[in-house]
Amino acid sequence: MRILIFGPPGVGKGTQAKLLAVEYGIPHISTGDTLRKAVADKTELGKQAKAIMDSGRLVPDGIMIGIAREVLSAPATARGFILDGFPRTIAQAEALSEMFDQLGFTDVRVVVLEVNDEVIVRRLSSRYVCTNDGKIFNALTDMISLTTPCPECGGKLMQRDDDRESTVRERLRVYHSQTAPIIRYYGERGATITVDGSRSVEDVNREIRSKLQDTVKA
Ligand code: AMP
């Protein structure tokens, strides 16, 4: 199974991508995670990306296309993958189509998660991440604050720099202006699967799998 997953920041793409990766036995590739690791490791890429990510803008296409090319030509992704966070611009989408042609990947499915912008702002500005195990919590629904230890492992919780409200609004603006046209690009080239991302993690996951199953059968 080869899947591209789209949706505004905070819609739950990463959560759903991780579940689908386990369910279909395919690697989850998140370009955001790749960049955050580079920032944490203080590599040259990380140094270049940090300020751009903190402002909510996009890392240049040339860098991102290079990362995608490297990952997709590795043996680990030869039999399938779920790509989360790439492509984000038309230039990236065109480069990806070329890579797919070269690699002979034809059965690529596109999943789109949709949710209202105000729900996103509320969700992200109350999202905390454990610095130890990477688990994600919500200040409102999990009744925690930044001074609470991680409910799972006791580690320290933090807020991602790009989850501050002003940055979230900029990320949404960038999503609507640069990434939403790609969904139309894929829509014109074949079926995209659209799912309401405002429901529970379990309900969203169930609907994605059911719709993927239907397209496999079609
Ligand atoms: P994400 O975790 O996918 O929301 O990504 C976090 C940030 O990483 C984004 O706001 C961008 O600054 C950067 N980023 C991740 N993927 C890409 C991409 N494909 N193109 C450009 N920037 C990206």
Image (cartoon, rainbow, N blue to C red):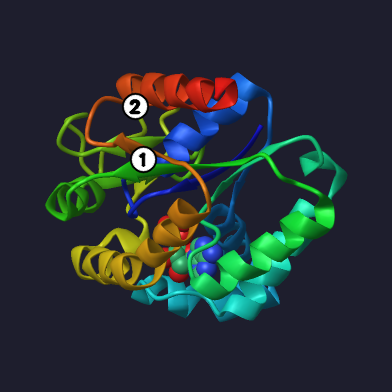
Taking the image as shown, residue 97 lies to the left or right of residue 33, namely right
Label 1 CA crowd tier, 10 Å (few <14, some 14–19, many 20+): many
Residue ID for mark 1: 12
Q: Could you tell me how far apart the alpha carbons at marks 2 and 1 are, in whole angstroms?
A: 9 Å
Q: Is residue 211 above or below residue 92?
A: above
Residue 62 drawn at (x, y percent): 65, 79
Taking the spot 26% from the left edge, 70% from the top edge, the residue there is 173
Return the residue nearer the eye: 11 or 129: 11
Residue 190 drawn at (x, y percent): 51, 47
Residue ID for mark 2: 204
Return the residue nearer the eye: 101 or 21: 101
Residue 146 showing in the rendered view: no
Quarter of the image for residue 144 reads top left
Mark earlier in primary sequence (2, 1): 1
Residue 122 showing in the rendered view: yes
The circle drawn on residue 54 is none
> Which quadrant of the rendered structure holds the N terminus?
top right
Find numbered disc 1 in the image and state the secondary structure of the residue it sits on.
loop
Find numbered disc 2 in the image and state the secondary structure of the residue it sits on.
helix
Taking the image as shown, residue 136 lies to the left or right of residue 186, namely left
Q: Mark 2–mark 1 contact, CB under 8 Å?
A: yes
In the rendered image, the residue lying farthest to the right is 75
Q: Is residue 93 above or below residue 199?
A: below
Taking the spot 66% from the left edge, 62% from the top edge, the residue there is 96
* Identity, as a three-letter code, of the amino acid under mark 2: Val
Q: Is residue 134 above or below residue 99?
A: above
Taking the spot 40% from the left edge, 24% from the top edge, the residue there is 205
> Which quadrant of the rendered structure holds the C terminus?
top right
Return the residue nearer the eye: 64 or 151: 64
Return the residue nearer the eye: 91 or 119: 91
Taking the image as shown, residue 212 lies to the left or right of residue 112, namely right
